Image (tube, rainbow, N blue to C red):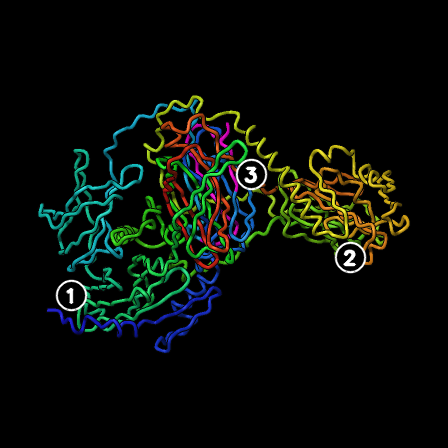
Amino acid sequence: MTNCNKLYCSLNKDLGNILVILIFLFGSYKLFPQDNVPIKDSLIAKYSRYVELPREILYVHLNKTHYLTGETVGFTIYSIDKSSKKPLKDTRNIYCRITDEKGLIVKEKLLVMVNGISFDSFYVDELLPHGTYTITTYTNYQRNFKEPNSYSQHFFVVDPSTAPEYSQKVDDSIDLQVLAEGGHLLNGVNNSIGIIIKSEDGYGIPNLSGVIERSDGTILSTFTTNKFGIAKTWLFVNNGNKYYARVTYRGQNHSVLLPIADLQGVNFSFSHLKDKIAVSIKTNSKTFPTVKNEKFKLIFHDGSTIKAIHIQFEDSTEVIKFIGKSDLFPGINIFTFFDDQDNPLLERLIFNMEGLAIKNSGDARIKKEKDSTLEYLSVKLPIENFSQSDLHNISISVLPTETRANVQQQNILSKSFLSPYLKSPIENASYYFRDVTIAKEYELDMLLLTQGWSSYNWHDIFNNPPKILYPFENGIGVSATINGEVGHEYMVYASLANSMEIIDPKDQNKFTLDGLFPFENELISISELNKKGKLKKPSLYLQFFPSKFLDFKHNQPIMKPKSEELVIDYNFSQIVETSWTEIEQLDEVTLTVNLETRRKRDLENDNLMGKVDVFNEQTRNRFMDLASYLRTKGYQVVNEMGTFQIFGRRGPNSFNNNRPPQIYIDDMPLMNNELLYSITMANIDYIVFNDSGLGGSQLDYGGSIKIYTDPKVPFNYSSPTVLSQEYPLTFSRPNKFYAPKYTFYTNSFFKEYGVIEWLPLLKANKRGMVEFRIEDHDYKSFKLFIEGVSENGSFISEEKTIVIN
């Protein structure tokens, strides 16, 4: 009989034996005095070196997964620090690519990420014919690591003109696997085993009953799979016997021979109790004499921090340890059992829901509003622990309540806390993090029982700690080699995202530019300033980094789509109206006029000493160039032969007797006016005139003209004094998402596959309230798919149905 008093240690005693080693972001750690292994040679030290570098997880929130030709794929990208589970702000360059079923590249965009958030869209045009596609996002920095931290997701395009007839074939083939907990069956002990049964497309077969039989036909245990095709049972293994798992599926019998049990060794099993877990570590009578009093280690980690427990078989073949859930890490815990030579023998993943900062939204407040000829629903949604004071983002897809168009395998929680730690894809990973119950926690534990070893490879941990071979990218870098006399300064002209800059390379024949963010069709433009301050066209050889779109292989397979997800039985004729863009444009013109009036008033309040002229498309077209515009303001302008001279104006408001005004562009004072020769009216957002110079600098003795460029217009310079060159790689400018206009909002197609709205960038106000509005087409209800993260560590991931009273 087993001596329970000796085997079952009290919880307090176990906690006292736990060696807690905290590995912080940059690898600092502490070993307790009872660990006599030198730090430089210990398992802990090797682990700390391996996890020293921060990891970056990407998650993409798609507005839905099923699209009709002419619709728009909207998405928000979240960058999460794998350790802290907070937005990672280091990344600026995000690569986003769409591939078809053959893996061929169809579309790609380089995106700018700000404070861990980016967004954009892809138009579903002729480049995306009927079929299945994959959207993948990744960064240069992720190439340093082997864990699956990038993101991929399937989506489907339905083109009514080319949609084939889908036939639902009946598939009788299955994949039946039996896996011992920890990785090995052990002879002479009771083994915990997991069973997973999948169809040909990789999805679990639910509610399938089976048996574990000995070779003589004796049934030793039975099982029934859950909704994901997973089951758990126990098996006592005797030497010399063979064991089979047998099931019958669609009239066909299937069986698989269980792995041969080890004659010597150890195994373990885990049990979830109310506030702790019990770990049973077993050996058999044949092994016990060789392992008695040997020092084993049971370690558990979450990819950044590690804890360890010493294990020793003293007078029994079984050791049981209790670990409080408060001592586990929130989220994933990777348990590995090591011998005294630090060889990993067994591994098991455990998930701890305690401590996860998962927040919920409150009751929505709905109000009907009318704007011009359109009716809207104004929505106010309180979200717990999200507030204006913390950096955060929330994205919401608004779809009809009966939607079938959003079949995403992941949500922000499953991607942040689960998937990067596994080698294999998970069917409907988001399921385990929505409306969490004890039953779901048990289902998640059964899933992890069948996952085997984690994505952290101990051979790599011991021998191949990652190095920063691929750094975080911050825009585009330019290396300029000077082919001529050195010692001059260089003027780098402003672009949409970068201000004008003066570079002084001293006496070097090379200079670099970092953090440039050129958008489509923008050029890099540079002039040389000689020692007299005159501009000339420089002789430079420019190299760009990066110079091409980065290739990257997503290192975790993703679930294939189910065949039934591709079947949409509707007549698509006249589902989407073709004139909706004209309606949107009319509304946008009205809105633009109102915003311009308000903006001019605000600018005048900010520039009390000057007069403000704000430009729009109509006012810009009245003038041929900047010189002709300034002449209408009373200035004398000479604009010829590459020179641009401005003389002050006379009049009742002129204080400085025709002295030339100081010119500024985006608040940078110009030492000469040659730059103005290449500025077009299209580049100008607004101008502030200050005739007196009061409130300005000493340069403004003759007054000032401050020209502010339009951030929406590419600033490309054409002048004999300017070197302009194309960027080989540019960033995408995010497009505004427009919900399609449907002919009918009551038919089956709209209810199951239509779009109401996509809101990629939402912020909570100081009261924690998210506010938005949607067009009202007499909806009785609608469904919100909400994802978000805050720098305070809070997450939200909800599917919420809103009923309109």
Give the Cα separation between the discs numbered 1 and 2. Answer: 91 Å
Task: Name the residue type under label 3.
Answer: Asn
Which quarter of the picture shows residue 270? bottom left
Q: Secondary structure at mark 1?
A: loop
Q: Residue 237 location in percent, x, y?
A: 15, 55
Q: Nearer the viewer, mark 1 or mark 3?
A: 3
What residue is rendered at 83% in x and 52% in y? 692
Q: Secondary structure at mark 3?
A: loop
Task: Name the residue type under label 1.
Answer: Ser
Residue 735, disc: 3
Q: Nearer the viewer, residue 704 or 440?
A: 704
Residue 285, disc: 1
Q: Nearer the viewer, residue 304 or 379?
A: 379
Residue 695, disc: 2
Confirm or deny contact between disc 1 and disc 2 (CB under 8 A): no
What residue is rendered at 65% in x and 41% in y? 596
Q: Residues within 10 Å of mark 2 (few under 14, many from 20)?
A: few
Confirm or deny contact between disc 1 and disc 3 (CB under 8 A): no
Residue 101 visible in the displayed image: no
Q: What residue range appears in magenta?
A: 120-145
Give the Cα separation between the discs numbered 3 and 2. Answer: 39 Å
What residue is rendered at 25% in x and 32% in y? 171
Q: Residue 335 location in percent, x, y?
A: 31, 61
**Chain-order first, disc 3 or disc 2:** 2
Figure check: 115 above or below 108: below
Looking at this rendering, what residue extends furthest in the right direction? 657
Image quadrant for the C terminus? top left
Horizontal side of residue 214 vs 686, given as left or right: left
Task: Name the residue type under label 2.
Answer: Gly
